[in-house]
Image (spheres, rainbow, N blue to C red):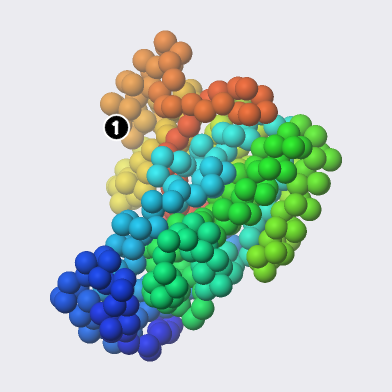
Amino acid sequence: MIFGSDDRKVNILEEYPTLCQVLEVSQEEGNCDCEVSYNSFIIKSRRSKKYRTIDAPCPHLKSIQRALLDRLLASVPPHDAAAAFVRGKSIAMNAQRHHGASHLFTTDIRSFFPSVKDSHVREMLRIHFPHFSQVFCEEIISLVTNGGQLPQGAPSSPHIANLVMSKFDERCQEASDNLKTVYTRYADDISISSNDAASLRRMERVVRIGLDALDMEIHSEKTRHLGPQQTKLVTGLDIGGSRIRPTRAFRRKTSALVRMSVKYPGKMNRHRDTIRGYLAFWYDIDPIDPQLPSLLNQMALHRWEVRLRAAQETNQRLLPIQPNPLQGRTQTNGYTKVRSNIVSLFKKLRD
């Protein structure tokens, strides 16, 4: 639902002359005739009743932001602890680093993208791109921010946010190494694991101090300290068992959807692609789960089923693995995150 827009009309060639020259923007590409530079709309959060604002740049502005990202900004990688918006990394790889730990601290940065201000971007450019002139930096800042902050919806925002957080990640990583804990950050989700609860309390102070220095706020409602007997989730995956798995609720609901698809094929036919998406996610995260072959067979995914059965018989690993720094264990990883809301699907099915 679109509820507002930025009424500032942008003449790209005139407003960003140096940037357009460096990026070789043609007259046609820079001739923006859009009425507004950003369209704003709201979406409901997948896990709560809260809403978030998306600021989508106009096609011309988006094209220049993408070119800036691909040709200049992407040359500097984020910190190794950053797992989101990084090619080759995934939620499973992020969760895998914490697998086997007996204690877990998780928290969230409140309003992550809006908290990244133009002053943060300016400092990031000074540190990571010292050869850029001041005029060039100001053009970049003007291009990638909206109302003095990073717009959630611009293609350049995720990587810029990661670069802005690099110093924070570096300090947290240094403290984590000293305390023998494991630190990762997936966008605004911070996870720190250890076999010692006291170390995590000390790491929480490090995180709070670091965020205060950036004028960012920790999300107290999403801050948790979890012990050995508690269910531990990192980026939505259960890290407490013998291997990384989707949550028990996800597995049970996906299995129920498969059974309903078999029992009511006509009614469920329109949901087959969605159910296959859930199974693909499950397959990517935990391909050796003994439940999967039967579910895949019922959904007529025979190629996956044959591959799984062969792998399970020979005890092979289907996907790359990465060791847990705490335990030295290894486990399969996945590369896909399904963002669909299973609960809403069940509600639709009842209608």
Q: Position of residue 329 (x, y in %)?
A: 60, 22
Work out whether 42 lies above or below 167: below
Q: Position of residue 341 (x, y in %)?
A: 48, 54
Query: Is any atom of residue 153 visible in this view?
Result: no
- The C terminus lies in which quarter of the figure? bottom left
Q: Kindly identify the residue that appears in the image at 44 percent across and 20 percent down.
A: 317
Q: Position of residue 81 (x, y in %)?
A: 57, 44
Q: Nearer the viewer, residue 341 or 322?
A: 322
Q: Nearer the viewer, residue 65 or 16?
A: 16
**Count of marks, rendered view:** 1
Q: Kindly identify the residue that appears in the image at 34 percent across and 24 percent down.
A: 305
- The N terminus lies in which quarter of the figure? bottom left
Quick check: 278 left or right of 120?
left
Q: Position of residue 72 (x, y in %)?
A: 35, 58
Q: Kindly identify the residue that appears in the image at 61 percent across and 50 percent down.
A: 169
Q: Nearer the viewer, residue 72 or 330?
A: 72
Residue found farthest to the right = 198
Work out whether 243 lies above or below 38: above
Query: Is any atom of residue 308 visible in this view?
Result: yes
Quick check: 186 left or right of 74?
right
Quick check: 21 left or right of 133?
left
Q: Kindly identify the residue that appears in the image at 22 percent across and 76 percent down.
A: 30
Quick check: 29 left or right of 278?
left
Determine whether the residue tagged by mark 1 lies in a helix, strand or loop.
Answer: loop
Amino acid at circle 1: Ala
Work out whether 251 lies above or below 313: below
**Label 1 belongs to which residue?**
300
Task: Answer few, some or many: residues within 10 Å of disc 1's Cα (few below 14, many 20 plus, some between 14 and 19).
Answer: few
